[in-house]
Amino acid sequence: MRKLKLNGLAAAALAGLLAAGLPLAAPDAAAEWRGWNIHVPDYPVSHGMEDFAKKIEERTDGRLTAKTYHSGVLGTQPDAIEQVRLGGIDFAVFNLGPMGQVVPATNVVSLPFIFKGMDHMHRVMDGPIGDEIGAAMAEKGLVPLAWYDSGARSFYNSQKPIMTPDDVKGMKVRVMNNDLFVGMIEAMGGNATPMAFGEVYQSLKTGVIDGAENNWPSYESTNHFEVAGYYSDSGHLIIPECLCINKGLWDSLSAEDQEIVRQAARESAELQRKLWAERAEASREKVVAAGVKYNDIADKAAFQAAMAPVYDAFLEKNPEIRPLVEKIQATD
Ligand code: GTR
């Protein structure tokens, strides 16, 4: 039987699924696989996951079937990471940001400004360094099948344009669940609040937090732009996402089915990356048309300098990860 360890809303959501008669035996490749997704159905990640499910079903003549539960109904991201490890959820697309709490090696991609841009991130993740990070995830029960895009994250808030790191001083900023991001905000003198994605809109609206940070599509799809109208293009984090599957389930598949599943995942990532580029542009246009005050930060050097202590603290705590950081920095 699948081991379930959920709390709060996630447990309630799962109880609903159980009441609806969904099976709980694992790993059972023949049962319909359940996929966790944090995003609304019309989002590049969501379309990628739908494409993946459709292809594995078609290519195995229905021997393998998968259904994606969108909009975070299966729980928060940290809970869902645990659930995919345990087999309570079969597959998911996770941002590697919150993954760092479980798989320390993934923290390298959450270091501010580690990547020089999206192309650099792709070159790193699609090569041996990506494989090394993937192997560390598999050791913790999550097998990555393909890397999805998530653009660059920038700061947004309800008060003023952010031009320099000093502007973050005293600001209450929501971050994803990872100590690294708390350190990042504190390095600029802000107050970091780790918080679930689904709580950010209300917290911005009621002033529990002043700001957050994310890419254009998430800023737009969550309507955060309605309650935090200043978006400042810091681009401080470029964090890839992974389509991953529970390791027990993966290991139970025949070599032939593994090949079908991996190929479908790769193709879904190609689609997702294409849709991502289009959506990033469309989301930016939509929020700017809606009145968002956007400012460019052409010279990011001051932000990079402010975040140097984040690297020092991280490498001091995780010296074994230094070679990985150096390999990424040495990749053109
Ligand atoms: C999004 C990402 C989600 C989630 C979210 C957040 O960009 O795609 O997986 O991590 O950010 O800020 O929590």
Image (spheres, helix red, strand yellow):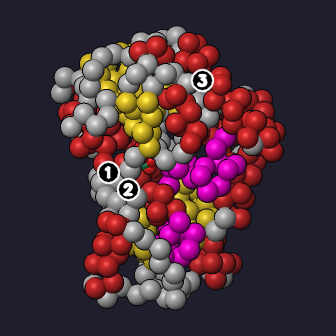
Labels 2, 1: front one = 1
Q: Which residue was labeled with disc 2?
A: 38
The crowding category of the residue bearing disc 3, from other C-alpha atoms within 10 Å (few below 14, some 14 to 19, many at least 20), is: many
User: Nearer the N terminus, badge 1 or badge 3?
Assistant: 1
Residue at left offset 60%, top offset 23%:
307
CB at disc 2 and ligand 1 closer than 8 Å: yes
Residue 20 is situated, as x and y percent measured from the top left of the image, at: 27, 84
- Amino acid type, callout 2: Ile
Residue 134, horizontal then vertical, whole percent:
68, 56
Q: Residue 303: image x %, image y %?
A: 54, 18
* Numbered tag placed on residue 307 in the rendering: 3
Residue 301 vs residue 212: left or right? right
Dot 3 lies on which element? Answer: loop
In this view, the residue in front, 122 or 210, is 210
In front: mark 2 or mark 3?
3
Q: Classify mark 1: residues with Cα within 10 Å, few (<14), some (14-19) or many (20+).
A: some
State which quadrant residue 118 falls in. top right
Query: Which of these two is toward me, 167 or 88?
Result: 167
Q: Are marks 1 and 3 in contact (CB under 8 Å)?
A: no
Residue 160, labelled with which disc? none
Mark sitting on residue 198: 1
Q: Earlier in the sequence, mark 2 or mark 3?
A: 2
> As shown in the figure, which amino acid type bears the numbered disc 1?
Gly
**What segment is highlighted magenta in the picture?**
82-108
